[in-house]
Image (cartoon, rainbow, N blue to C red):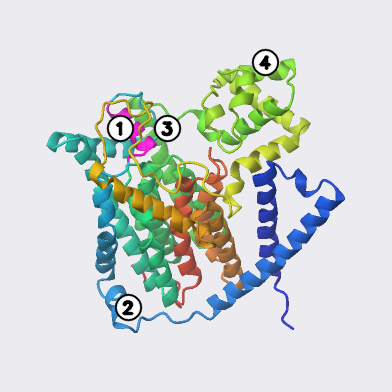
Amino acid sequence: MQKISKNILLTSLLLSLFVVTGYAVSNYHNINILYRGIKNISLTILAFVVLVIAFYLLISLIFHILDKSREVKFTSKLGQFIFEKHAILKLFLIFFIVGIPILVIYYPGPIHWDGLQQLDYFYGIHEWTNHHPVVPTIIMGLFVKLGRFLINDNFGAFLFNFVQYNFSCFVFAYTINFLHQIKTPKWLVISIFLFFLINPLWYIHAYTLVKDTYFYLFFMLYLIAFIKYLYSNSKWPFILSAIPLILFRNNGIHIVILTLIIVGLFRKDKRVLNSILVLFFACFQIVYNYTLEVFNIPQSNIREMLSVPIQQTARYIKKYDLTKEELKVYQSVFIISMDEIKKEYDPELSDPIKFSFYAEKDTIGPYFEMWLKDFFKHPKVYFDAFLENYYGYIYPPKREFKDGLAWFIVVKNEMVNTGYFNFKMLNKFKPARDFVEENIQNVRELPVIEFLFNTGFYTYVLIIMLSYAIHKNKKEYILVAMPIILALAFCFLSPVNAYIRYMNPIIVTIPILIGVITNQNKDKFTNLK
C-alpha cells in the first residue's frame, strides 16, 4: 500500500478549504452557511472530505506525470527547426504572423479606460498625477503626438500598440527559448508555446493601449533575470529588468525590494549584494519621487493603498448602527453620507466607496484608530468584507468581475473620452471583431476549458507547483516563485475581485515557474547567459 504523502495531503486540504469557502461566499456572501446547524455542518464536512480525496488523487496524478517527464530534446525536424538554431527569431515570427488578423481587424487597437486617461494627463485635459505612472504616460503621449503629426490620432495609437505587439512577440519567444535552454521537458515546452500561441487574448492584450501589457511583459523578463541572478553572478540584467517594473506600476518597487529582502534571509551568499541592491532601488525610488515633486506631479492618493480597510469600514457602516463617535470619525474622511455609503457599497469592487475617501493628515490617524476599535467590536464583518472582495483569486469557478477577459473597444465614457481625441476602429471590420469575441466566449463556455480563463485557477496551479517543488526536494525553487507570490499578494490588496488585468503578471510567469521546477538542467542554470 502506497504511503500517504503529507505534502500532497496538506496541499489538498488547503485547496479544499479554498473551494468550500469560495462556494459559500459566492452564493451566500459569507461563510455562515458552512457551520450554522447540524445539517449544514454535516454537508460541509462531507463536501470537504470528498474534495480532499479528489484533490489528493488529482495532485498525485499530476506529480506522477511530472516525475515521468524526462525527454527534453526535439527529435522531429519541425521541432528542431522551431526550437533549436535561431529559435528566438523563428518563434518571434510565428507569434507575429499568427496575430496579424488581430492587427488588421482591431486597428488601431483597443483603447483602455486607463490608457485614455493617461493621454488625458499628457495633453493636460486632466490634472497629471502618478496614479497612472508617469513613464508609460509619457511614452503613450509621445506616440500619439507623433501619429497625430504624421497622419492622425488613430495612427498614433497604432504606433504605440504595434511596438507593444512586437515586444510581446519577442518576450514570448524569449521565454519559450529560455524554457528550452534550461531543459524543460519537451511536452511542457510545446504546451506552454501553444498556451501563448493559440489564445487570441494574448494578441489583444498586446495590441491594447494600456500600461498593464508592458508591465506583465517586463515581469516575465524580470523573473527570468531573477532566476539567472539567483544561480549566477548575473546582476546587471536583473537590475535593468527591475527598473521598468518599478516605472510601469506603482507596486513594482514593493515587489522588487521585498523579493530581495526575502531572498537575503534565506540565501547567505546573496545577503550582502541583496542589501546593496535594496539600498540602490530605495534610492532610485526616492530620486524618482523627488523628480515628480520637481515637476509638480502629485503621488497617487493614499486611498489607492487602502481598499481593504475602506471596504471593511463600508460593510461595517452598512451592517451596524453607528455611535456618535463612529459617525463623527467616518464623516471626517468620506465626502458622501453614510446612507450613500450603504447604497454604493459593492462587496467586490472598492472604487464606489474608495473614490469618496479623502482623509487628510489630521483625520487619517483617528480613522485608523476607529477602524481598529470596530474590528475588535465586530471582527466577523471585517473578515466577510475581505473574503467577498477577493475570493475570486482562490476560487476557480469565479469568473472575472470587471472588464471581461480583455478590452475589445475604444472606451466611450465621457469621463475619459472627452472628444479631444478621434480614436475609432474601422466599421468594415466590425463583423470580424464580433466573430472573434463571440468565439472567445464560446470557447470559455466549454467544460473544464472555462477554468483557464478564471483567476483562481492559476492560484491553484501556483500552489500545486510549489507543492511539487517540495515533493521533489527542490525547496530552493520556492524563492524563484517569490516575485509571483508577491504579485498575487498584491491582488489581495487591490480594488477588484477576480480581475484578469491584475492577474496577468501571475498567469504569464507561472509557465516559467513550471519550466524551472521541472527542468532537467544539472548545473542549476549557471551556463545561462
The residue type indicated by label 3 comes to His
Q: Which residues are magenta?
A: 111-123
| Eye-nearest disc, 1 or 3 | 1
| Eye-nearest disc, 2 or 4 | 2
Q: Position of residue 490 (x, y in %)?
A: 53, 45
Residue beneath label 3, please?
A: 131
The residue type indicated by label 1 comes to Leu
Residue beneath label 4, please?
A: 328
CA–CA distance in space, label 4 to label 3: 29 Å
CA–CA distance in space, label 2 to label 1: 44 Å
Residue placed at 53% from the left, 81% from the top? 68
Q: Is residue 218 visible?
A: no
Q: Earlier in the sequence, mark 3 or mark 2?
A: 2
Q: Looking at the rendered structure, which numbered label has been put on residue 119?
A: 1
Q: Is residue 437 left or right of residue 485?
A: left
Task: From the image, give the main secondary structure of the stretch colored magenta.
Answer: helix
CA–CA distance in space, label 1 to label 3: 13 Å
| Eye-nearest disc, 3 or 2 | 2
Contact (Cβ within 8 Å) of mark 2 with mark 1: no
Q: Is residue 153 visible?
A: yes
Classify 10 Å Cα crowding around label 4: few (below 14), some (14-19), many (20 and above): few
CA–CA distance in space, label 2 to label 4: 69 Å
Q: Quadrant of residue 226?
A: bottom left
Determine whether the residue tagged by mark 4 lies in a helix, strand or loop: helix
Classify 10 Å Cα crowding around label 2: few (below 14), some (14-19), many (20 and above): few
